[in-house]
Image (spheres, rainbow, N blue to C red):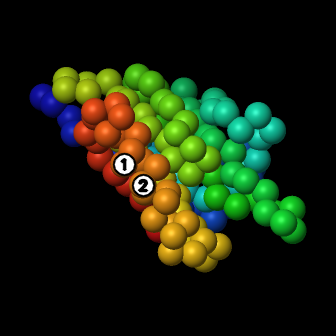
Amino acid sequence: MKHPVKVSTFNARTLKSMFQMSELAASVINFDINILCVQEHCLFHEDHDLEHHELDKNWTFVSVSPWINFINSTIGGVGLLLSPHALNSVEKITSRIMVANFNGNPSTTVTWCYSSINVNDEEGVINVYNDRLLYDLYQNTTSSLLADI
């Protein structure tokens, strides 16, 4: 019997400790969610590339670092919490946009993003989505879009 893949989004508004990540992983396991797209995690890492955080029960949190504003606070950050068998590949597009491809037949591609309207003007918000649309056109792909705007 086939089992559906459950995908959800979560605006963490700050997820700065391993305890909080482990608690989040326990929640998605409890609700039988396979893929959780996380926005605004605020987990800063210097290299600004993808960072993999190994959690309990072989779950993984893959994150893109948020940016630091003029008062030295972290803003944003997108990430992906996923079950041990789900991920095929993950790619950082910008500091606000990630794309992942998941195992399955057919495979599933999911894009998720964070566009903080409280710190961006309308043009800035639109640019976030234009970045993703241009990338899709360049790659000639179709995907699901999960967003926190």
**At numbered mark 2, what does the secondary structure look like: helix, strand or loop?**
helix
- 56 or 83: which is nearer to us? 83
Task: Verify CB contact (< 8 Å) between mark 1 and mark 2.
Answer: yes
Q: Number of marks in the image?
A: 2
**At numbered mark 1, what does the secondary structure look like: helix, strand or loop?**
helix
Judging by the rendered image, the residue that carries numbered circle 1 is 133
Instruction: Give the percent coordinates (x, y) of residue 52.
Output: 63, 30
Horizontal relation, residue 90 to residue 55: left or right = left
Instruction: Give the percent coordinates (x, y) of residue 2.
Output: 15, 30
Instruction: Give the percent coordinates (x, y) of residue 123.
Output: 51, 70
Judging by the rendered image, the residue that carries numbered circle 2 is 130
- Disc 1 marks a residue whose amino acid type is Leu
Residue 37 vertical position relative to residue 58 in the rendered view, above or below? below
Determine which quarter of the picture holds residue 146: bottom left
Q: Residues within 10 Å of mark 2 (few under 14, many from 20)?
A: few
| Quadrant showing the N terminus | top left
Horizontal relation, residue 6 to residue 114: left or right = left
Instruction: Give me the residue at 46% from left, 49% from top.
Output: 131
